[in-house]
Image (cartoon, rainbow, N blue to C red):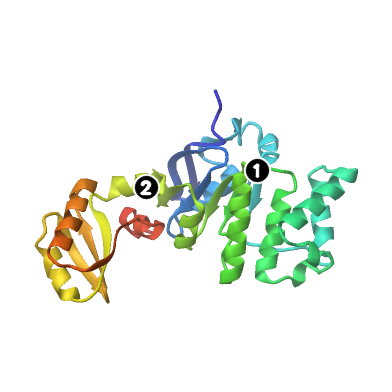
Amino acid sequence: MTVPLLEVKNLQRYYGKVQAVRDLSFTMERGQVTGFVGPNGAGKTTTMRIVATLDLPDGGDALVDGVSVLVEPREVRMRIGYMSDQFHPYPNLDVMQYLDFFARAYGLRGRKRLHTVRMVASFCGLTSFAERPATGLSKGMGQRLHLAKTLLHDPLLLILDEPASGLDPRARIEFRTLLKELSAAGKGILISSHILPELGETCDSVVVLEKGQRIVSGSIAEIQQSVRHEQAVSMRVLGDVAMAEQFLLVQPGVGQVFPDGQQLRFAFAGDDEQMSELLARAVGQGVRILEFARVEADLEDIFLKTTKGNLQ
C-alpha cells in the first residue's frame, strides 16, 4: 500500500499568543500540484517551513514519503526541494558556479555533479546565462536560478512559496510551463500564490486556509460542488439583449441575471436536463443564441466563497 507523498497531521504552531497553524491536516499524492491558498497571515509560509524542516511545530507532524519531519529531518531534506519567497544569491558567483556550489552541498561529486548542473541549467533555460553574475539577473531569470537550485538533488516534493511574485506576464507563463513539465515528470508540487487565476490553471487540487485552519480542500470541481448549489451560466445572444433578459427572469431555477454587452450571466438552480430544457425554451421563444455554456468556478470564486477575510 503506497503512502501519500505528503501527509500533514494535526499541525499546530504558536508565535507567542498567536496560533499561526491550528490543527491542520491534508494529504498530497505523487505527481499532484496542490495550490496553497489563503489571505496574508493564514499560516501558509509557516506550514511550508515546517514541512521543509526549517521550523518545528508545537503539535502534530508532517510526513514526506512516509518520513517524519520531526524524527528524520535529514531524510526529509533529501526528498524535498524548498523555494522560499525571497531569493538572495551569493555575490561573486556566476550562474554555473552558484549551481555547482549547491550541487556540492547536496553531496554530488565528479561527473555526476557536472552532468546534473548542466542538465538542470538547460531545463530551466539558464545555459545562455551560464557566466552571468548570479546577482545580475532579472527577476524572472533569478526565479529560474532559484528553481534550478531547488531541483539539483532530484527531490520528490517541491515546496514553492510565492514563486511567481514580481514576475512579468511572459516570465509567469514560462515559469508555469516549467511547473507543468515537472508535474508531468512525477514531481509533487505544493505551491502558494496570490495570483489565483494562474494558480488555477496549474493545480490539480487546492487547500484553502484562513487563520491557520483548513477551510476546504480538494479539486476545484469538488470544492465548487460543496460551496455552490447553483450553476453559473453564460449566454451570448444576437440582437435584443433586453428581450433575452426578460425571458430569463421569469424562468424556473434562474436567479440573478447580469447583462454585459451581448452576454448575460445568470445563476441556475437545476441539473443538466433542466438546463437543456431552458435552452430549448429560449430558442423556441425566439432568443437568438450564439453561445450557451456553464461557467466553471475558478480559484478566485472559491476563495471569496470560502474565506471571510479574517486576519490574525
Sequence-earlier tag: 1 or 2: 1
Q: Position of residue 82 (x, y in %)?
A: 64, 50
Rendered residue at 68%/61% (across/down): 144
Rendered residue at 63%/47% (across/down): 54
The local crowd at label 1, few if under 14, some if 14 to 19, many if 20 or more residues have their Cα within 10 Å, is many
Q: Position of residue 172 (x, y in %)?
A: 58, 65
Q: Position of residue 65 (x, y in %)?
A: 60, 33
Q: How many marks?
A: 2
Asked which quadrant contains residue 168, the reply is bottom right
Amino acid, disc 2: Ala
Determine the residue located farthest toward the right in the rendered image. Answer: 110
Image quadrant where one finds the C terminus: bottom left
Name the element at disc 2: helix
Image quadrant where one finds the N terminus: top right
Tell me whether circle 1 and circle 2 mark residues in contact (CB < 8 Å).
no
Amino acid, disc 1: Ile
Determine the residue located farthest toward the left in the rendered image. Answer: 250
Front in this rendered view, residue 142 or 72? 142
**Residue identifier under label 2:** 221
Front in this rendered view, residue 98 or 129? 129
Q: Is residue 17 above or below residue 168?
A: above
Name the element at disc 1: strand
Q: CA distance from mark 1 to mark 2?
A: 28 Å
Q: Is residue 53 visible?
A: no
Front in this rendered view, residue 291 or 71? 291
**Horizontal side, residue 241 vs residue 33: left or right:** left
Rendered residue at 23%/49% (across/down): 229
Asked which quadrant contains residue 252, the reply is bottom left
Q: Position of residue 34 (x, y in %)?
A: 50, 47
Any mark on residue 80, and which? 1
**Horizontal side, residue 158 vs residue 99: left or right:** left
